[in-house]
Image (tube, helix red, strand yellow):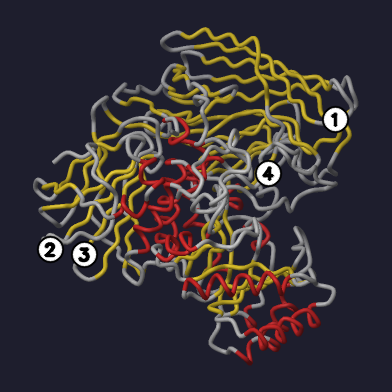
Amino acid sequence: MLSRNILHYGKEAPLPERITLRAGPLDLMYDQGDLRSICLGDQEILRRVYVAVRDRNWGTIAPVFSNVELRVDSDRFAIAYDVENRAGEIDFAWHGEIRGEADGTLTFEMEGTARSTFYKNRIGFCVLYPAGLSGRSAEVEHTDGRREQAPFPVDICADQPVEPFANLRAIRHPVRPGVVAEVCFRGDIFEMEDQRLWTDASYKIFCPPLSLPYPVEIQAGTRIEQSVRLKLIGRRPLVKRETMSIPGGLRRGAGASLLIKAPRDWRPAPPIGLSVASHGEPLSARELNRLRALHLHHLRVELRLSEPEYPDRLKEAMDEAGSLGIPLEVALAVSSSEPEGQLSELRDWMAELRPAVCAWLVFPEHEPYTGGNPSEEIARLANRILKPNAPSVPLAVGTNTDFIFLKRTRLPLQWMDQVCITLNPQVHAFDLQSMVETLEVQPVVIESARRMAQGRPVRVSPITFRPRFNPYATGPQAQSTPGELPPQVDVRQASLFGAGWTLGSLRAMVAGGSESVTYYETTGWLGVMESEKGSPLPHLFPSVAGSVFPLYHVLADYGEFAGGQACALSIASPLLVSALALKRGEHTRYILANHTAESLTIELETDGETLDVWSLDATNAESGMRDPEGYRQKAGVPTRTQNGVALFHLQPYGLIRADHHPVRSTHFLPGFSRDAGVSS
């Protein structure tokens, strides 16, 4: 039996406690040394303030806290703690103090000492401004005293730093009429980058500037002192305490409900596919049957043409795709030094094997972070060599890593039919809330890519929970230690949270108008179901051998409407809930996901008088994982709406699916099993 915590978020250990604080008119949360969601009423001023220690390959060194002291009053607080950041050669210790005053002033100070000699890319404060400030004006004060006005970027900005947010002493921006938030930075040279380049929903102020050489050797005994201060300027704001803070956002009143509006903007539902499993084991008959139930559009295979064994990988992918009755999406990593020879050899293999292909994705094997444009020559050659034998198969050019690589590339528009990007939510932050925040930015990234491609369709392939590799390393990368999870693996892949995040991402793909989407792998701990052999490290990645993961059911619910329409439903609190509507013919489906550890009450506007409702949460998830076939054949709970509104009680990290048929019958489509978490 899997515990509630493992079902919720993949680990037995409880989540770190978050403490709600007030500094006069400000509401905020303290979370293991960080300040989060700093708000004046319903206006978020800062999303997060924290200290980061990052190694020479931009790896984040986890902090270990001790001697934590909290003094909390009704309108002020003081926090002090000690931290050690230790990994490999790195040994850095520091003391942090945070104070919140009754006038709304927040001060965050750190003093640290290097206890070893090591190379680092960053040590210091990171201050995140919410992406919702896009287009809002700010006053920038530089270290030389100059001041100038500038808006927060609207389109995603690849310039580092974002001008004129460089050499910063302070930033001031209005938060409501007559009230300005001033944030001051001391102890280093600070600048801004647009974190939407990695789907983080923020603009980040950090130090030191990226124009300085890195990595930098820090000598043992080196001291680092920095501070950040937030102050409210203007008439003292009066805030009625009508809101209650909960993880991920704000809602009004302890028992209030969240309203999800009826679907309005219907769009074609983008087809979805999966990637070939990286563990190398063939699919079993049972796994093939379960994958067929997802109504997949394609199977993605990535071929690194410099590797002599890639034809074997292509043959294995062909066999699996053929068994599923779907074509291949072929992603090609091409060496810039010999692209013509590699593509010609691939053409010969394709002529011999004759696989069904729905798209080519082409990019350099080693994408340049700055300067150069090898994509153009590779795209030109791919058109000349691959296109003649399959002129109707679209050629997508783009990136196989983070969006910043695409933003710094001049796309070869004359040689491409589509643009391709890949997404993951954990380049900079790894907690649940930060992952949910990225869902807000995924449509923005798709729209930015489409503008770059002058309106060409955008393929998103693949979406994964963690980065598949590190494209920023400046030195040798440490290999996975035996007995530890590989860096690509996330235990939340097998959790209800992972299922809810996947629904939120599907909603984002619809909102952004993606052409097609590839998620995860077929099987294994990077897939949609556990392998028949089970987890290689069950004490670290707890799962049930031969079971599906909860996100399998989200993809199955979506797949049953393949070729239909979809609508990204609107909700005022997207950090709490994601909602998606699907339609095919006269049949409408609503899927909801709770991203929080709190039970939520949802009001859903619908056009129907009666809904058939299924729930998926900790009370029934394991049975649906062990026996997905039986689980999906059970009938839903008939639920009547009142004045076109259905009321649901969404359990922690739970999901609900509600189907509307204009004419009720005794036949139900396969779906979630009955559950008591529904009310009429």
Amino acid carrying mark 3 in the image: His
Whichever of callouts 2 and 3 sits on the residue coming sooner in the sequence is 3
Whichever of callouts 1 and 2 sits on the residue coming sooner in the sequence is 1
Q: Which residue is mark 2?
A: 662
Q: Nearer the viewer, residue 111 or 274?
A: 274
Q: Nearer the viewer, residue 448 or 631?
A: 631
| Res. 585 in view | yes
Q: SS for tag 2?
A: loop
Whichever of callouts 3 and 1 sits on the residue coming sooner in the sequence is 1
Q: Are marks 3 and 1 in contact (CB under 8 Å)?
A: no
Cα separation, mark 4 vs mark 3, equals 42 Å
Q: SS for tag 4?
A: loop
* 633 to 21, vertically: above or below: below
Question: What residue do we see at 59% from left, 75% from top?
Answer: 318
Amino acid carrying mark 4 in the image: Pro
Task: State the mark number for residue 587.
Answer: 3
Whichever of callouts 4 and 3 sits on the residue coming sooner in the sequence is 4
